[in-house]
Amino acid sequence: MATNQTVPLKPPVKNPHNVEATKYYIFNETGNIMMASTIDSSQPLSQEVQDVFSEVSVFFAGMSRAITNTINPETNQPFSLYNYTALGRIISGSGLFVHVTEEDVLYQTNQFGANFSKELIESLLGLATGAGALSFASAMISSIGNEGLNINGSSSTSDSKVGNIVFVCEYLLGMPIISAIVVYCDAKEHKQQLQLGPCFKESSVTTSWTMHKDTYMFVTPKFINNYAGNLDSITSDPQYLEMIEWFSGLLLQTPEINQVVNSSYHDQPVESGSELDPANTYTLLGQFFGSKKGSLQFTNNADNKASITTGSWNTDAISFTVKGTLTTASAIEVLDASKKVIATTAESFTITASS
């Protein structure tokens, strides 16, 4: 039986048997992947754990290649790996990141050069390295700063955020855990600090930075698991190239159709070559169709004996009904509000002849 009484929250009683495990860590050369383990380097990780962590390397390599090889339509230049808009589109569009925490961080310092870079990264990652040097720190912070300067110097872009992503691969008491930390700031708000260049110029000026930090749980994609142990061989593999193309589609938000389902029969997938029934309602599933309602049409309908009536229109789903006669199998095209064809189904359909 429920009561309205509240129980005061008390700090736990100290227990000498509760001991935090020692954690060993190391970064890759660029600082984008951090490995941490409660076992020291003399004890090798199991093959299963190595496979899971290798998937992170494959994912990061594919993401980096897609971002730096995709032209930003606003600048006609390739996206930068430090462009937060590009990172955000892959994070939100891939479905592999689960948002766990977010926080705004106010960081003030009078450090400069390598000390500034190291201190900032330690603060953002919550990692005290002591006297140990983070050799990648200066290059990473300098690259972020240069991207900010490029944004401030460009009049053709609406992107104002710069940031970076760090994957944290942890092996904690036998359990592999992967998370991603994404940090960004507004380049236009920090124009003066970026011009001052604390990451690579000596200065005694105290600078203040407002940054946003998001932490995600990362779910490794199963379809690249088979290639985890042989990263060099996958650069020309069709599945890997398909992943690159998928990333590029997320960056450019290219409209894409995944399948057509029969909404009148529990969203049962409609196979290619099927007859569409005018009595049923169908739904076209995909992504980036746009928020403004457009229209659908058959590709082979020269005699205009068949038509499609659209119902609800969302960015990832369009409901529709059909009527008329269509004996020649035809794909369905999605047209935006300006009547431009933006996507076409891979499947072709006919319409059931009216009785």
Image (cartoon, rainbow, N blue to C red):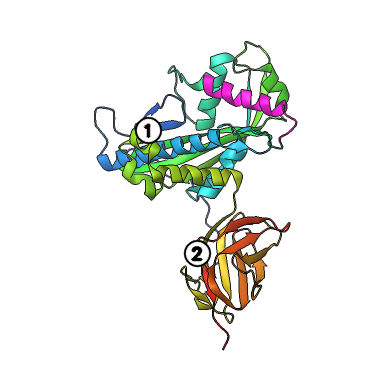
- Residue 57 rendering spot, x and y as whole percentages: 40, 36
Quadrant in the picture for the C terminus? bottom right
Position of residue 180 in the picture relative to residue 206 (left or right): left
- Residue 168 rendering spot, x and y as whole percentages: 43, 36
Magenta: main secondary structure: helix
**Highlighted magenta segment, given as a residue range:** 139-157
Position of residue 197 in the picture relative to residue 90 (left or right): right
Q: Which mark is residue 347?
A: 2
Nearer to me, 241 or 194? 241
Whichever of callouts 2 and 1 sits on the residue coming sooner in the sequence is: 1
- Residue 226 rendering spot, x and y as whole percentages: 32, 45
Magenta stretch containing residue 151, yes or no?
yes
State whether residue 21 appears in this view: no
Position of residue 329 in the picture relative to residue 301 (left or right): left
Rendered residue at 57%/72% (across/down): 282
Q: Rounded to the nearest whole Å, what is the CA distance between mark 2 and mark 1?
A: 47 Å
- Residue 44 rendering spot, x and y as whole percentages: 25, 33
- Assign a secondary structure to mark 1: strand
Which residue extends farthest front? 303
Instruction: Indicate whether 98 appears above or below 31.
Output: below
Rendered residue at 55%/32% (across/down): 81
Q: Which residue is mark 1?
A: 36
Q: Which mark is residue 272?
A: none
State whether residue 321 appears in this view: yes
Which residue extends farthest bottom? 355
Rendered residue at 50%/72% (across/down): 267
Q: Tag 1: Cα neighbours inside 10 Å, few (<14), some, or many (≥20)?
A: some
Nearer to me, 282 or 107? 282
- Assign a secondary structure to mark 2: loop
Kind of residue sitting beneath label 1:
Ala
Q: In the figure, residue 149 lies in which quadrant? A: top right
